[in-house]
Amino acid sequence: MTPDLWMLAAFLLLLVAGVPVAFSLGLSGAVGIITGLSPAMLATLGTNTYNSVAKYPLIAIPLFILTGLIFERAGVAARLVRFAQALVGPRHGGLAVVAVVVCMIMGGMSGSGPADAAAVAMVMLPSMTRAGYPRPFSATLIASSASTAILIPPSVALILYSIVVPGVDLRALFAAGLFPGVLAGASLLIPALWLSRHHGWEDPRDVERPPIGKSFREALPALFAPVIILGGLRSGLFTPTEAAVVAVAYGVIVGLVVTRELSLKDLWGLMGEAAIVSGVVMLIIALAGIFAWSGTMLGTFRHLAEWVIGLSDNGALLLVLIMLAVLAAGMLLDAISIYLIMMPILIPVMQHFGWNPVWFGILLAMNIAIGQFTPPVAVNLMVTTEVAKVRLEQTVGWALIFVAAMASALALVAIFPEIALWLPRILGYNV
């Protein structure tokens, strides 16, 4: 076998054997160096791992992870739920609408689907179960709604995409993700409302509507968070990385002073949790640097890109095939791993067909979002089924309904790129 095949075969075999993605990337990259270059080139491993994480924009990732944890512990989700219930009012499917809306707002704070799913599930699942919603349905709806966090800014996945793809403005990506994220959430409301009314879940007579004024005042600090982050970015007051620092500081103030549900002891523990999660992410990025360097030196990514381009001269058909491949990858891998593994191959394809890199990044993010609640892995579903105390296989039927709904939103953004590109253009970003 050629060194290219040795490296790819080693990566696939390690994944099948259950080796974590980070170590699969690093070890297969080392195999490529040994078989295709020289064992002496293993001396570059330290340099490659360091260069992969020694990037200033990556500082935003652990900070936004910490932001999500702080807002979750500060009782923000419960206040948002009460406010959304006050707006929606008692009706069939009202709690389903509340779950989707709150997930989207929380996504504008955490940038992480699993964190969003955990925060909302803890608050919404008990009340949805009391209202008559089946727990597998509720768990699936929250998991699918939480996947919009990968689109609605700030998004950890979009931060990484801006680093992997040269020349892409992160502010433009954040702006481009807003409308597709809202569209994805709205697409979930249609089947959720129809199913609720069809099955008669949630009798409006049994639901008490919270007072709008009081619930709005309680939710105001949470509603201000996305405004502060996006407003500061738009005004140029701070960079995306500095926005992460501002978000953490604001979350601490809200938790300690406003809601008073956060203590200094809690904050210390949350910093430890954020460090653990961030450590996993950074380990993947660091060891992926070995894989990327090896694949670049061997020409592996160039060969794979040429093979993909050679599949068809029809750009639309090839885009569909790429989306299906990314969806399949999203069922098994996390967003960070998908970007690091697939983007070296997809960047030449994107350039060959002249696809807008901002629009293409949003399509990939929407596809990965669908993968977050599509079994067998479905990281968001794993979180919500654990909270709901149901088996993952009980959610498959519901998940397929929401996959179809969000896939329709993905198709609209693919057919009409201006859904993603209109806002960054209006804001003056280079797209």
Image: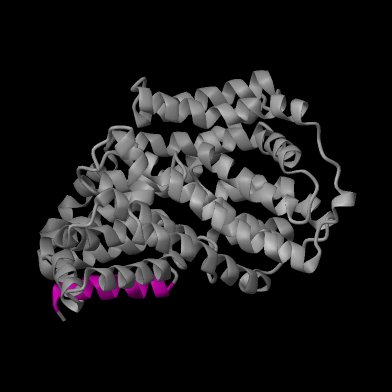
Above/below status of 61 relative to 138: above
Q: Residue at x 50, y 55 (%)?
A: 184
Is residue 119 found left or right of 362 in the rendered image?
right
Residue 243's spot in the image, x, y percent?
Answer: 41, 28
Above/below status of 5 relative to 20: below
Above/below status of 403 relative to 359: below
Above/below status of 82 relative to 9: above
Q: Residue at x 29, y 63 (%)?
A: 27
* Magenta stretch encompasses residue 16: yes
- Give the farthest residue toward the bottom: 1
Residue 70's spot in the image, x, y percent?
Answer: 59, 33
Q: Residue at x 67, y 29 (%)?
A: 219
Task: Tell me the quadrant of the picture where the N terminus can be found.
Answer: bottom left
Is residue 313 found left or right of 422 in the rendered image?
left
Question: Of 123 and 333, which appears nearest the observer?
Answer: 123
Look at the image and give the residue range highlighted in magenta.
2-17
**What secondary structure is the stretch in magenta mostly built from?**
helix
In this rendering, does residue 210 appear at all?
yes
Question: Of 42 and 417, which appears nearest the observer?
Answer: 417
Question: Of 116 and 389, which appears nearest the observer?
Answer: 116
Residue 126's spot in the image, x, y percent?
Answer: 79, 51
In this rendering, does residue 282 appear at all?
no
Q: To which quarter of the image does residue 328 belong? A: bottom left
* Magenta stretch encompasses residue 415: no
Q: Residue at x 47, y 60 (%)?
A: 409
Question: Of 357 and 345, which appears nearest the observer?
Answer: 357
